[in-house]
Structures are given as C-alpha cells and as structure tokens.
Image: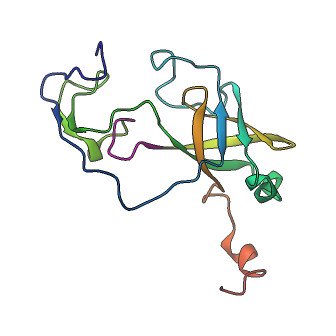
Amino acid sequence: MSTDTDLRSGEVAVDAPLPRDASLYFIGRIRTPWTSRLETPRQGSLEGPVCRLEIFEPWVAALQGIEGFSHLQVLYWLNQARRDLVRQSPRHHDGETRGTFALRSPVRPNPIGVSTVRFVALEGSTVLVRGLDCLDQTPLIDLKPDRCVFTPEAASDHDDGK
C-alpha cells in the first residue's frame, strides 16, 4: 500500500460509527528502535532488542512486584493503524482476502496490540522487556503477568475474593 487509504484487491472498508462507549487511560509510552511501520517486525522475538515501557504517574506504584514475573503481557494502542477495513488482503499471505477478525493485522476497529514479552529489569518507572513489535512512542494501555506463568493458587492465598 502506498497510502493509508489505498485498498488491495478484495479489501473492503466501512465508515466506522462515532465512538461512544469507552474511555482508555494510557498508562505510559513504549520506546522501541522502530520509527517506521516498514521496519517494524511482524512479530516480536523474545531474543529481540530491549525495549522500554515508560510508565506515567499515577500508575508507577502499580509496578510493585512486577520483578517476580519472567514474562508479561503488554497491551498497547496501535495509534497509526487504519480502523475501517472489514476484509483485508495481507501482503504476506497467500493472496486470499480474509475478514479482519480472522487476522492478526494491526488494522482493526479497535487497534489494540498484545505481545508476550520477557521481563528484563525494572529501572524506576521504566520496565525493560524483550519481544515487542510496535513503533516507537506507541501508547501503552496495560501490563499484566503472563497467564501461563501466573499462579492463581498463590494469588488466591492473598485474595479475599473482592
């Protein structure tokens, strides 16, 4: 695609409804080495470069205990992605047009990205990780322990269910 409004063969765009039912708080900013969508990897690698999750106040206190996890889930807002395609013809696929919900494309009605990353270190209000695949300055939505390594039984010892 040469511009954000060009369509590939078989693609279908729609007029999105006006937003009306949710608010997001960006809890930080992601710093990566990639400044262009063309140079950003299609999928992150747990051996990839160290990236920085810069957490904003008042959310810094929420980092307490994060060092205890080897892998995290990072949710982020793909702020440069289109939001109007319902059928797409991905460049790296077999030429088949597919529905947006059948793809991992960043082009979605709500362009939320999620990556499983390897925790490297915590430096003040900055979390260092490996495994991201997003542009520098991407808004950070949330950060969670990876569900595969989180132990609900251990957490339930300290949770009163409320």
Image quarter where the N terminus lies is top left
Residue that sits furthest to the right in the current view: 124
Percent x, y of residue 149: 67, 58
Q: Find residue 111 and report its image quarter.
A: top left
Q: Main secondary structure of the magenta part?
A: loop
Residue 33 lies left or right of residue 44; in this view the side is right
Residue 129 lies left or right of residue 26; in this view the side is right
Asked which colour scheme the image uses, the reply is rainbow
Q: Is residue 87 above or below residue 62?
A: above
Percent x, y of residue 29: 65, 37
Q: Is residue 98 above or below residue 57?
A: above
Percent x, y of residue 81: 39, 32
Q: Find residue 118 and report its image quarter.
A: top right
Name which residue lies at 60% across and 48% down.
Answer: 26
From which residue to which does the magenta span run?
Answer: 106-112
Image quarter where the C terminus lies is bottom right
Q: Is residue 19 above or below residue 96?
A: below
Nearer to me, 21 or 3: 21
Residue that sits furthest to the left in the current view: 10
Percent x, y of residue 154: 75, 74
Residue 19 lies left or right of residue 140; in this view the side is left
Name which residue lies at 60% across and 43% down.
Answer: 140
Q: Is 109 one of the magenta-colored residues?
A: yes
